[in-house]
């Protein structure tokens, strides 16, 4: 059991100029170290970070959410953090729930996922079509791993040292959350969920919509099956 763990909040950001300052402020007010990973944004995200003295790691080109989050895991490992917590830059994740995720890691989990579907509160639970997709991915994960994960697409999650090490070495590039759960379970890590309340995106536009949502479902379903069926070296 970790005593007084060092916790880093990773904030991946791509074109989040309208949200990034308020997101960082909420994390700072909650008392956590943080790093913004600017994933080659085309808007003024980087300028806003620099103007406001925000701690930012600027990627020279867009790596996608997987590459940005992996950069955050590598930052956490390099600087000796015991736990890192992913908080998306769009304002959906409320930092007041970070202690619940951290406590789950302290109490033995390797990966703790913030689930909007374990809570009875009236927080934002995504659109109808996305909820259908989430239920499908939950079923697909259970089919291949035997574990029931209610909110496999949640980007609000905490990683302990073993998960950080795994993700530094192997993290999906594209739509990584469900696949990384499968990878973690296959590696023998302990994955659990805690109830959280999420908000609607505070500004900007989601990257998943229209045709990309169809691609998302096909790609992630195949990735989960491949991750579970491929032998580890």
Image (spheres, grey):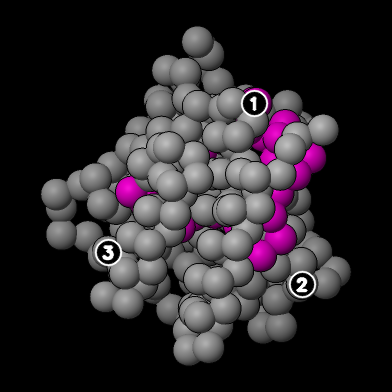
In the displayed structure image, the side of residue 172 where residue 197 appears, left or right: left
Helix, strand or loop status at disc 2? loop
Marks 2 and 3, how far apart in space?
28 Å
| C-beta proximity under 8 Å, tags 3 and 1 | no
Report the residue at 26% width, 65% height from top: 124
Label 1 SS: helix
How many neighbours does mark 3 have within 10 angstroms: few (below 14), some (14-19), or many (20 or more)?
some
- Occupied quadrant, residue 175: bottom right
Q: In this figure, which residue is indicated by the disc labeled 2? A: 62
123 or 177: nearer the eye?
A: 177
The first of marks 1 and 2 along the sequence is 2
Please state which of residues 184 and 37 is positioned toward the viewer in this rendering: 184
Which circle marks residue 125 in the picture? 3
Q: Earlier in the sequence, mark 3 or mark 1?
A: 3
Q: Secondary structure at mark 3?
A: loop
What segment is highlighted magenta in the picture?
Answer: 150-177
- Which of the 4 quarters of the picture holds residue 79? top right
Q: Which residue is mark 1?
A: 161
Residues packed near mark 1 inside 10 Å, few (<14), some (14 to 19) or many (20 plus): some
Residue 59 percent across, percent down from the top left: 80, 64
How far is mark 3 from mark 1, CA to CA? 29 Å
| Label placed on residue 42 | none
Report the mark closest to the observer, 2 or 3: 3
Classify residue 62 as left or right of residue 208.
right
């Amino acid at each position: 059991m970790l005593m007084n763990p060092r916790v880093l909040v990773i904030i991946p950001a791509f074109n989040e100029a309208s949200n990034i300052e308020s997101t960082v402020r909420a994390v700072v007010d909650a008392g956590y170290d943080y790093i913004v990973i600017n994933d080659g944004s085309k808007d003024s995200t980087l300028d806003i970070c620099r103007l406001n003295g925000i701690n930012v790691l600027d990627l020279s080109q867009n790596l996608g959410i997987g590459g940005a989050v992996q950069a955050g895991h590598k930052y956490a490992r390099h600087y000796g953090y015991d736990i890192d917590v992913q908080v998306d830059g769009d304002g959906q994740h409320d930092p007041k729930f970070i202690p619940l995720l951290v406590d789950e890691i302290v109490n033995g989990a390797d990966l703790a996922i913030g689930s909007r579907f374990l809570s009875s509160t009236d927080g934002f639970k995504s659109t109808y079509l996305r909820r259908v997709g989430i239920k499908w991915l939950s079923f697909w994960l259970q089919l291949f791993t035997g574990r029931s994960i209610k909110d496999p697409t949640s980007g609000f999650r905490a990683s302990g040292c073993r998960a950080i090490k795994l993700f530094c070495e192997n993290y999906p590039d594209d739509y990584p959350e469900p696949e990384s759960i499968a990878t973690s379970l296959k590696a023998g890590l302990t994955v659990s969920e805690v109830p959280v309340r999420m908000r609607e995106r505070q500004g900007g536009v989601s990257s998943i919509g229209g045709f990309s949502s169809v691609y998302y479902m096909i790609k992630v379903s195949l990735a989960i099956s491949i991750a579970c069926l491929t032998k580890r070296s």
